[in-house]
């Protein structure tokens, strides 16, 4: 058999010829090789520190759009989340298209609200927006298919919204759905002294408790908010004081059931209200939120006294839902129609002119035509000036969803009939003097109408707090929380003035300010500007301004860091603020792309022990942890 090779290779070195390059030659040649560098476009890489790319993971620089659905409690949560994000440095924008992240704060009361929420999620995903979900929908049903893979923040975890947003922007999915507890006892929720951006700088919404004691068969909110958990009276009073010091002139108390307040902590609603009226300044007003009949029945005498207080609106929202006892029993409302009538009749007698608002559900499972007619008679009897009419929607997971349903066409017709009844009367007819006299003296309808609309009515004191939807008037409310439109004079905004009522419509009256009357201002403090974060004291603001004058080059980045602090204790001495300012300055420089080590070494040689401790932290420490450390100073 022939060999594979004719010659035998005795040594491996025999395969290297004299002409082959030696290892030393190879190393020398490598030094003379110059790699080609692709020229990059300078325009595509031009960035400024003030306007980082939308996909940047530098914390506190992205734009966030917040959308809130639902009740005033949910709106308050939205204001708190906006305040914390803005304080940390994020820009809250009204333009959803330019936002890097959408924060959607949902409502689970009715199907249409959840449908809007679901459609907004889809729209955000189609626009490649980062999404964080909040509110009652994801809290009650976090495992729904359309919520998979999305970040969720629970209704009791809103104080951690910065963390959730930061991780979401980095591409992570975060879910915080736990409950706040102290020694095993459930708390009302996040702290009340968190930063906040009020939608209306003149109105502060305070949640006095979360959850309720009922188990209504149609309610999905119970699944999200849970059982009753009340805030201590001291914390609520402190929040009210802080609000008035920031220029607020109207406070709304809100919860799922204000009447049940305090039952879990050994107190009650009247006790809280008497404490609050002590701190309400002249020219400011307090408005009570919704209360169910069972719990207000126990305090009717005290509630009548409080509602007669000159700085409390004579207004109460008491939902009846149905005038049929059998329907109320199926709803598990824990009261009968007679209880509701007793509450309304008593308050109307003891609080002259009081405004009673109520809710009615049309087409609840098992509601007969006779049941619905009882509801119609109730509305005809009391002629409620504010009536919230809701067509029944079966919510998933509720007992009512499993009951025998009223046909959709019947529900729609009942809703329509009740709406027509509501629009058939004018609740403000009694607000104009002399109308009945003119009505009796003439039979000419056109003349009666003219006299009706132009007759000068009674004089009322109103508090001006907002602008009308058509931007033609300012909106004020009289002592009964009835809407009064006044001329659009900037001097009136936030003031309590006297007006003469000269016209009444279905949902409003019009008033002309009395020129010689006194104008009341609730606070000597200038109200916060729209979009401004609450919670910073004046001494802290001044320290911030002084520091910026000394270090103008740090202005833009410094604002992001200093606003992240949540210092609301007004007893903190100025020296502590000064140390905090230095610490924040170091913290903010750690966010910048340039190396902060030189500045840290300089700061370490200062007299501030806090700054020396801060500089000892590794540079890789996440900014969020650094922020919380500074807050603990």
Image (cartoon, helix red, strand yellow):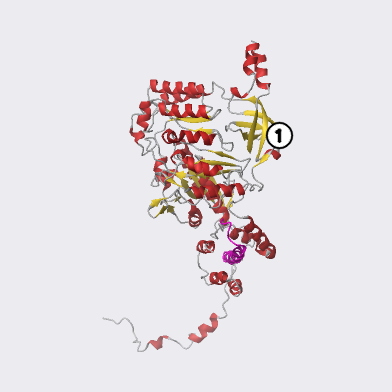
**Residue 562: quarter of image:** bottom right
Answer whether residue 4 is visible to the viewer in this image.
yes
- 605 to the left or right of 118: right
Q: Is residue 588 magenta?
A: yes
- 531 to the left or right of 256: right
Which residue has dot 1 on it?
A: 517
Question: In the rendered view, would you say 392 is above or below 225?
Answer: above
Q: Main secondary structure of the magenta part?
A: helix
Question: In the rendered view, would you say 430 is above or below 253?
Answer: above
Bounds of the magenta segment: 568-591
Q: How many marks?
A: 1
Q: Point out the residue furthest to the right here.
A: 516
Q: Relative to the observer, which residue lies in front, 59 or 268?
A: 268
Q: Is residue 23 magenta?
A: no
Q: Position of residue 476 (x, y in %)?
A: 63, 35
Q: Point out the residue furthest to the top here.
A: 443
Q: Position of residue 438 (x, y in %)?
A: 65, 15
Question: For the N terminus, which image quadrant?
Answer: bottom left
Question: In the rendered view, would you say 589 is above or below 393?
Answer: below
Q: Residue at x 64, y 15 (%)?
A: 437
Q: Relative to the observer, which residue lies in front, 617 or 179?
A: 179
Q: Position of residue 379 (x, y in %)?
A: 48, 23
Q: Relative to the observer, which residue lies in front, 529 or 283?
A: 283
Answer whether residue 47 is visible to the viewer in this image.
no
Q: Position of residue 287 (x, y in %)?
A: 54, 38
- 35 to the left or right of 408: right
Q: Residue at x 59, y 51 (%)?
A: 534
Secondary structure state at the residue bearing disc 1 = loop
10 Å crowding of disc 1: few (<14), some (14-19), many (20+):
few
Q: Relative to the observer, which residue lies in front, 424 or 235?
A: 235
Question: For the C terminus, which image quadrant?
Answer: bottom right
């Amino acid at each position: 058999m022939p060999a594979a090779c004719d010659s035998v290779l005795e040594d491996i070195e025999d395969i290297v010829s004299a002409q082959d390059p030696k290892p030393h030659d190879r190393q020398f040649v490598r030094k003379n090789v110059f790699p080609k560098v692709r020229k990059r476009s300078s325009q595509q890489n031009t960035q400024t520190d003030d306007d980082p790319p939308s996909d940047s993971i530098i914390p506190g620089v992205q734009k966030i759009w917040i959308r809130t659905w639902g009740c005033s409690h949910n709106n308050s949560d939205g204001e708190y989340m906006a305040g914390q994000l803005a304080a940390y440095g994020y820009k809250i924008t009204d333009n959803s298209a330019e936002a890097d992240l959408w924060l959607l704060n949902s409502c689970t009361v009715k199907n249409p609200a959840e449908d809007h929420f679901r459609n907004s999620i889809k729209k955000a995903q189609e626009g490649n927006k980062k999404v964080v979900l909040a509110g009652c929908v994801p809290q009650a049903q976090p495992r729904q298919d359309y919520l998979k893979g999305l970040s969720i923040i629970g209704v009791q975890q809103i104080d951690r919204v910065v963390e959730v947003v930061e991780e979401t922007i980095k591409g992570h999915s975060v879910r915080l759905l736990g409950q706040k507890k102290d020694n095993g006892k459930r708390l009302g929720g996040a702290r009340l002294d968190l930063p906040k951006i009020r939608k209306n700088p003149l109105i502060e919404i305070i949640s006095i408790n979360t959850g309720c004691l009922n188990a209504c068969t149609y309610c999905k909110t119970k699944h999200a908010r849970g059982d009753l958990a009340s805030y201590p009276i001291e914390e609520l009073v402190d929040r009210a004081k802080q609000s008035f010091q920031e220029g607020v002139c109207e406070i709304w108390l809100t919860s799922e059931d204000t009447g049940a307040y305090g039952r879990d902590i050994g107190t009650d609603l009247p006790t809280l209200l008497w404490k609050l009226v002590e701190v309400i300044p002249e020219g400011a007003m307090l408005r009570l939120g919704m209360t169910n009949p069972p719990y207000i029945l126990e305090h009717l005498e005290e509630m009548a006294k409080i509602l007669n207080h000159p700085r409390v609106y004579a207004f109460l929202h008491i939902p009846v839902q149905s005038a049929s006892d059998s329907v109320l029993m199926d709803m598990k409302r824990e009261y009968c129609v007679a209880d509701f009538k007793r509450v309304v009749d008593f308050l109307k007698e003891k609080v002259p002119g009081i405004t009673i608002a109520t809710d009615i559900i049309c087409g609840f499972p098992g509601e007969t035509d006779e049941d619905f007619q009882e509801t119609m008679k109730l509305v005809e009897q009391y002629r409620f000036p504010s009536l919230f009419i809701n067509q029944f929607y079966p919510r998933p997971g509720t007992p009512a969803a499993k009951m025998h349903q009223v046909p959709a066409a019947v529900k729609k017709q009942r809703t329509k009939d009740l709406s027509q009844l509501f629009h058939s009367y004018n609740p403000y007819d009694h607000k104009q003097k002399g109308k009945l006299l003119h009505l009796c003296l003439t039979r000419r309808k056109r003349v009666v109408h003219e006299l009706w609309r132009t007759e000068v009515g009674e004089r009322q004191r109103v508090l001006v707090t907002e602008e009308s939807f058509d931007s033609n008037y300012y909106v004020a409310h009289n002592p009964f929380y009835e809407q009064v439109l006044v001329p659009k004079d900037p001097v009136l905004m936030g003031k309590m003035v006297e007006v003469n009522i000269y016209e009444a419509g279905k949902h409003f009256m019009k008033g002309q300010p009395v020129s010689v009357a006194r104008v009341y201002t609730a606070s000597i403090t200038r109200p916060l500007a729209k979009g401004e974060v609450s919670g910073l004291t004046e001494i802290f603001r001044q320290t911030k301004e002084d520091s910026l004058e000394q270090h103008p080059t740090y202005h833009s980045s410094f604002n992001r860091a200093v606003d992240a602090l949540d210092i609301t204790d007004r007893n903190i001495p100025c020296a502590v603020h000064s140390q905090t300012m230095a610490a924040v300055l170091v913290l903010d420089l750690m966010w910048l792309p340039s190396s902060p080590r030189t500045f840290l070494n300089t700061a370490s040689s200062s007299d501030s022990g806090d700054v020396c401790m801060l500089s000892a932290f590794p540079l890789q420490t996440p900014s969020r942890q650094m922020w919380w450390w500074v807050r603990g100073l």
